[in-house]
Amino acid sequence: MVFVDRKNGVFHINGEFQIGTIEIRKSLHLRLGLPFDRPLLRIANALDLSTTNDSGRNDSIRKGSTILKDVHIGIPSSGVSGGSMSLVQGSYEYYHYLQDAVNDSGWGCAYRSLQTIISWFRFQHYTSIDVPLHREIQQSLVEIGDKDPSFIGSREWIGAIELSFVLDKLLGVSCKVINVRSGAELPEKCRELALHFENQGTPIMIGGGVLAYTLLGVDYNEASGDCAFLILDPHYTGNDDLKKIVNGGWCGWKKAVDSKGKSFFLHDKFYNLLLPQRPNMV
């Protein structure tokens, strides 16, 4: 499994993906009657009772003790009459601007969406890597040759394609990308997005223009075409107060056009939707 060594600034691979190890896990899944499409007997499933990392630094923040989890639970309804909700399956953490003492306001929204997505893979035990910091994300893009070395430490934006590269490098996760020419076309993708949440269950990154969001679900009425998008907004700059976040609409249902005629997705901007695929592995 790939993991990040922050102390030495390098990436390593251990034996968890070696063929022999995989075959042993498959044999145990068979003997114990466990499913063959979920990791249940891997290092990531172990209980971690430690409070410090190898360098002695308290890593509780990176492990999620102060980062809000599953903030969409209990939010107000979408307003879609007769709709069918399709939601993210499993837990995640809410990453947004100004966390980890990083002033990324204005440029770090896609990084934060990526962190939320990786936290989902951690909670579902597909990986045991720490959620990477901005610099580690940048370093991985440099190492695969997508960016020049000067990119590390910069405030340059990244988008859906860069996120797919990082997920592939750090987690071995493949992604599907949906392109739309205008925000006005996004409601046409609701059926496809609903199928993603029902079959894959992973958070989706929506990137377009100068903004990036995390999508946690859709509420879709197939007969009428009415739909709403459950948006987790990484542009939030306040403290991790759940009530403040929900009341402020930083996590909530958004219609493409609200009751006042205001468009949430811009009609003069293109959008790329990154749909991480759930690994089929033990």
Image (cartoon, rainbow, N blue to C red):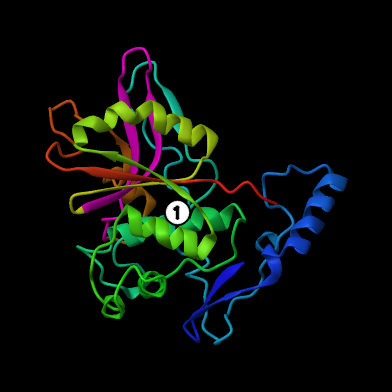
| For residue 180, side relative to residue 219 (left or right) | left
Q: Residue at x 50, y 46 (%)?
A: 277
Q: Amino acid at mark 1?
A: Ile
Is the N terminus in the top left, top right, bottom left or bottom right quadrant? Answer: bottom right
The residue furthest right is 31
| For residue 193, side relative to residue 228 (left or right) | right
Viewer can see residue 50? yes
Q: Residue at x 68, y 52 (%)?
A: 39
Quarter of image, res 102: bottom left
Q: 229 or 100: nearer the eye?
A: 229
Q: 57 or 123: nearer the eye?
A: 123
| For residue 43, side relative to residue 260 (left or right) | right
Q: Residue at x 20, y 43 (%)?
A: 270
Disc 1 secondary structure class? helix
Q: 165 or 71: nearer the eye?
A: 165
Question: Compared with residue 145, is residue 244 higher up or lower down, i.e. above or below?
Answer: above
Q: Which residues are magenta?
A: 211-237
Relative image position of residue 45 (x, y in whole percent) = 68, 59
The residue furthest top is 223
| Structural crowding at the residue carrying mark 1, measured as other residues with C-alpha within 10 Å and reported as few (<14), some (14–19) or many (≥20) | many
Q: 64 or 89: nearer the eye?
A: 89
Relative image position of residue 186 (x, y in whole percent) = 27, 33
Viewer can see residue 240? no
Relative image position of residue 189 (x, y in whole percent) = 33, 30
- Residue 36 falls within the magenta-colored stretch: no
The total number of labels drawn is: 1
- Residue 223 falls within the magenta-colored stretch: yes
Residue to which mark 1 is pinned: 117
| For residue 177, side relative to residue 186 (left or right) | right
